[in-house]
Amino acid sequence: MIDPGDPRAVIRRAALTLLQQRPYTVQRLTQVLRRRKVDGAVIDEVVAQLQDQGLLDDEAFARGYVEL
């Protein structure tokens, strides 16, 4: 269960929900998450974790875009 008082958990859940809907670049996902008025350092940390886990990948996004 997500702790609504934990901004990292809230941002991670928001990011995963967005990524389930469509692929995002690092820049675009960061822009969308910044609308939530959460500390930028938290967003940067979550985005970096998603990249490390292979869930957010600009190269894969570009390959998919080119294949369209």
Image (tube, rainbow, N blue to C red):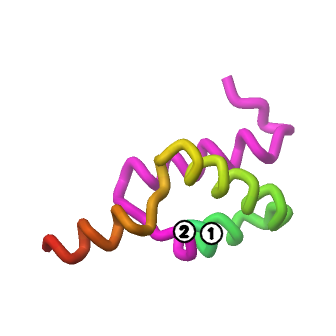
The quarter of the image holding the N terminus is top right
- Indicate the secondary structure of the residue bearing disc 1: helix
- Which residue is rendered at x = 48% and y = 47% of the image? 54
Name the side, left or right, on which 15 lies relative to 65: right
Q: Which residue is mark 2?
A: 26
Front in this rendered view, residue 38 or 56: 56
Q: Residue at x 81, y 67 (%)?
A: 40
Which residues fall within the magenta stretch?
1-28
Left/right of residue 45 with respect to residue 30 in the rendered view: right
Give the main secondary structure, helix, strand or loop, of the magenta stretch. Answer: helix
Name the foreground residue: 48 vs 37. 48
Dots 1, 2 in contact, CB < 8 A = yes
Q: Residue at x 45, y 60 (%)?
A: 57
Quadrant in which residue 38 is drawn: bottom right
Q: Which residue is mark 1?
A: 30
53, 35: nearer the viewer = 53
